[in-house]
Image (tube, rainbow, N blue to C red):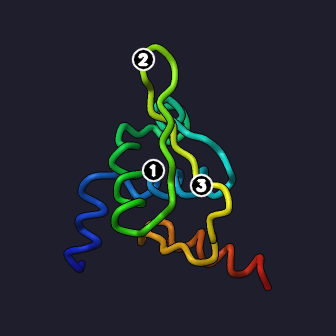
Amino acid sequence: MPEGNMHDLTFSDPSQVSWACEALLSGRTIGHSDEIIEAQGWRLAAIVHRLKHRYGWPISTEYVGPENRACYKLQPGADRAALRFPPSAKGLADRRKGDAK
């Protein structure tokens, strides 16, 4: 397995990464509690960081509530067709291409 893929798998389960990508693409604002409940994960901040900095996703962060909880969403007007996908979410990119045909 190439080293880049090992890095993706080391820190976050592929299903959690795919869940985060799908949730953001659907227009949702997601937070850590969403990931815990829906994807049984604990690393949303790390996933978002990687999507933003490694794959160039335009994700905005808003801090809400007295706990200053981070909530993430894809920025309005983001060019979804130009997004690069991590290996575990390639199926989402392929599915979106099929929808555009």
Left or right of 49 on screen, residue 91: right
Q: Position of residue 69 (x, y in %)?
A: 44, 26
Distance of mark 2 from mark 3, alpha carbons?
A: 23 Å
For mark 3, what is the residue?
Answer: 75
Q: Position of residue 62 (x, y in %)?
A: 50, 36
**Front disc: 2 or 1:** 2
How packed mark 3 is, by other alpha carbons closer than 10 Å (few <14, some 14-19, many 20 or more), is some
From the viewer's side, name the closer residue of 90 and 79.
79
**Front disc: 3 or 1:** 3
Residue positioned 20% across, 75% down in the render = 3
Nearer the N terminus, badge 2 or badge 1? 1
Left or right of 93 on screen, residue 46: left
Q: Position of residue 44 (x, y in %)?
A: 40, 43
* Residue contact between numbered discs 2 and 1, judged by CB atoms under 8 Å: no
Nearer the N terminus, badge 3 or badge 1? 1
Residue positioned 68% across, 80% down in the render = 97
Q: What SS does tag 3 mark?
A: loop
Q: What SS does tag 2 mark?
A: loop
Amino acid on which disc 3 is placed: Gln
Distance of mark 2 from mark 1, alpha carbons?
A: 24 Å
